[in-house]
Image (spheres, rainbow, N blue to C red):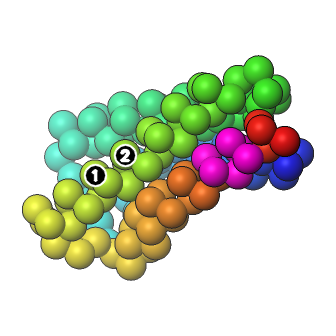
């Protein structure tokens, strides 16, 4: 099971690093459903994208040795889940985003608990 979890974590890490890098390099212009932003919002967006980049690198680091880094891996899963919860807050506060972000929110709310459970199961077997 750890091999499957490792592949899932590595795939997720690669995806996150690519997406975060794109956000850093291109800003918000490539995101569906966005409009021009102020320099302040652009700066803020690229800053948070760097944190997302580091999240992806941390996820990849965990995948290299899940048995030893399982607690950090679980923390990263929780972090992604909390990110999904913040999308719900945004939905309530600002309305429905582009459908792509609805899907991303669903992934962020569903995948972490499932992977966490698989990880705990792998740890006990």
Bin the neighbour count of mark 2 within 10 Å (Cα to Cα): few under 14, some 14-19, many 20 and up. some
Q: Nearer the viewer, residue 43 or 58?
A: 58
Q: Do residues under tags 1 and 2 come within 8 Å of each other at their CB atoms?
A: yes
Residue that lies at the very extreme toward the front in this rendered image = 124
Examine the rendering and report whether any part of residue 25 can be seen. Answer: no
For residue 41, side relative to residue 118 (left or right): left
Q: Position of residue 109 (x, y in %)?
A: 44, 60
Quarter of image, res 62: top right
Q: Is residue 47 above or below residue 117?
A: above
Q: Position of residue 90 (x, y in %)?
A: 20, 59
Where does the image place residue 59, in percent across and percent down from the top left?
A: 65, 35
Assess whether residue 82 is covered by the magenta stretch: no
**Vertical side of 87 occupied by 55: above or below:** above
Where is mark 2, residue-wise? 82
> What residue is at 77 percent from the left and 37 percent from the top?
123
Which residues are drawn in magenta? 116-121
Q: Which residue is mark 1?
A: 86
Q: Secondary structure at mark 1?
A: helix
């Amino acid at each position: 099971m750890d091999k499957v979890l490792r592949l899932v974590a590595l795939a997720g890490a690669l995806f996150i690093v690519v997406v975060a890098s794109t956000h850093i390099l291109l800003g918000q212009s490539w995101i569906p459903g966005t409009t021009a932003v102020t320099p302040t919002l652009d700066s803020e967006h690229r800053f948070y994208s760097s944190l997302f980049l580091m999240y992806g690198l941390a996820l990849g680091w965990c995948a290299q040795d899940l048995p030893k880094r399982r607690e950090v891996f679980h923390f990263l899963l929780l972090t992604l889940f909390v990110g999904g919860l913040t999308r719900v807050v945004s939905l309530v506060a600002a309305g429905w985003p582009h459908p792509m972000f609805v899907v991303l929110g669903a992934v962020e709310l569903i995948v972490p608990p499932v992977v966490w459970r698989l990880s705990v199961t792998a740890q006990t077997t």
